[in-house]
């Protein structure tokens, strides 16, 4: 279940010589019929340019399972988990502390280093508690929670589905962009347009529109249409003038406008 297509779970966290993926998580996922992407490489094989592929895989997956055990000094996963919690992304977390006196890759960890490494774990626990995200200390239980999350999210939109629908939308020379957002995705337009004020071609970017993971592909297209209509309305508002003034300009400061509004006299 670790082929080239989109997968439901990204197996993030401790790599190196760890075996939690093949020994525990992968058998449980396969038994439940849940697809996964395993990013683990041989020790020392990971290169900086592998990061782009990992990011693509993470965006495609419904859930990310992160296992950060006491036998890893890696801090990147700790930072990433904190980000996922703050961004309200579906994540299952297994987290244990580093013990002073333990040995990681043939080097003993002293008390000072253990405390430094565990501060990040303490922060993750605090973030998780604030956002009601459960944390497990057992890989099997964390994987079971991951499977439950996948089953609850199946049939929802993925970034790949959103991008595929937008690739079929055609309007002038405008192009759609999409990115993950808490609970869904943002889509927006970009294009080269004549600047109303300078008369010169300039890159323009529209506002971002939210699409929930629970929307249908048709909802994505309807939102794209609304984005195009708003883009064109923006142009109309910039060109429309009364007494030489752009009275309906979308760039007028709303607070300044409100300060000039006078309530009508009522008897």
Image (cartoon, rainbow, N blue to C red):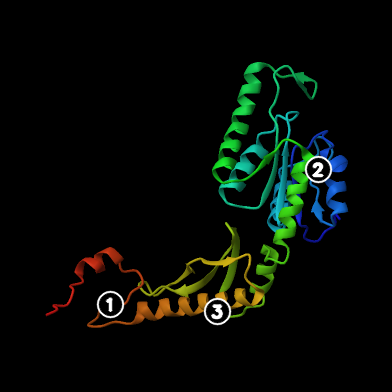
Look at mark 1 in the image and give the residue it sits on.
247
User: Can residue 117 be seen from the camera position used here?
Assistant: yes
Seen at 73% across and 33% down, the residue is 69
For residue 231, above or below residue 21: below
Percent across and percent down for residue 49 are 72, 47
Mark 2 / mark 3, whichever is N-terminal: 2
Q: Is residue 189 left or right of residue 68?
A: left
49 lies left or right of 30:
left
Chain-order first, disc 3 or disc 1: 3
Q: Secondary structure beneath disc 3?
A: helix
Q: Which residue is mark 2?
A: 40
The residue carrying pointer 1 sits among few (fewer than 14), some (14 to 19) or many (20 or more) residues within 10 Å by Cα, namely: some
Assess disc 3: are there few (<14), some (14-19) or many (≥20) residues with their C-alpha within 10 Å of its C-alpha: some
- The total number of labels drawn is 3
Horizontal and vertical percent position of residue 26: 85, 47
User: For mark 2, does the 10 Å Cα neighbourhood hold few (<14), some (14 to 19), or many (20 or more) residues?
Assistant: some
Tell me which corner region of the image, top left, top right, bottom left or bottom right, holds residue 129. Answer: top right
- Please tell me which residue is depicted at 87% across the width and 40% down the height of the picture: 23
Would residue 158 appear left or right of 184 to someone viewing this image?
right
Residue position marked by numbered label 3 in the rendering: 225
Q: Considering only vertical position in the picture, is 3 above or below 220?
A: above
Asked if one can make out residue 57 in the rendered structure from this viewpoint, the answer is no
Q: CA distance from mark 1 to mark 2?
A: 59 Å
Which residue sits at x=72%, y=50%?
54
Residue 109: x %, y % from top left: 71, 19
Q: Earlier in the sequence, mark 1 or mark 2?
A: 2
Q: Nearer the viewer, mark 3 or mark 1?
A: 3
Between marks 3 and 1, how big is the CA–CA gap?
Answer: 26 Å
* Image quarter of the C terminus: bottom left
């Amino acid at each position: 279940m670790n082929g080239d297509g989109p997968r439901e779970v990204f197996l993030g966290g401790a790599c190196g010589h760890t075996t939690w993926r093949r020994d525990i998580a992968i058998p449980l996922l396969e038994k439940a019929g849940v697809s996964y992407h395993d990013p683990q490489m041989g020790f020392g094989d990971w290169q900086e340019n592998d990061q782009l592929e990992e990011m693509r895989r993470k965006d495609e997956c419904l859930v990310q399972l992160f296992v950060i055990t006491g036998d890893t000094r890696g801090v990147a996963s700790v930072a990433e988990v904190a980000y996922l919690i703050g961004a309200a992304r579906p994540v299952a977390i297994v987290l244990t502390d580093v013990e002073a006196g333990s040995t990681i890759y043939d080097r003993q960890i002293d008390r000072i280093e253990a405390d430094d490494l565990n501060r990040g774990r303490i922060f993750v626990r605090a973030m998780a508690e604030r956002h009601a995200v459960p944390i497990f200390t057992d890989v099997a239980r964390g994987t079971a929670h991951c499977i439950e999350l996948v089953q609850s999210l199946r049939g929802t939109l993925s970034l790949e589905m959103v991008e595929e629908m937008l690739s079929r939308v055609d309007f002038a020379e405008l192009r759609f962009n999409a990115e993950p957002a808490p609970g869904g995705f943002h889509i927006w337009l970009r294009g080269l347009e004549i600047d109303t004020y300078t008369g010169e071609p300039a890159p323009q970017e529209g506002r971002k529109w939210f699409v929930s993971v629970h929307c249908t592909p048709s909802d994505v297209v309807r939102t794209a249409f609304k984005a195009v209509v708003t883009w064109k309305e923006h142009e109309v508002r910039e060109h429309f003038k009364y007494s030489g003034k752009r009275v309906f300009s979308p760039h007028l400061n709303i607070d300044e406008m409100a300060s000039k509004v006078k309530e009508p006299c009522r008897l």
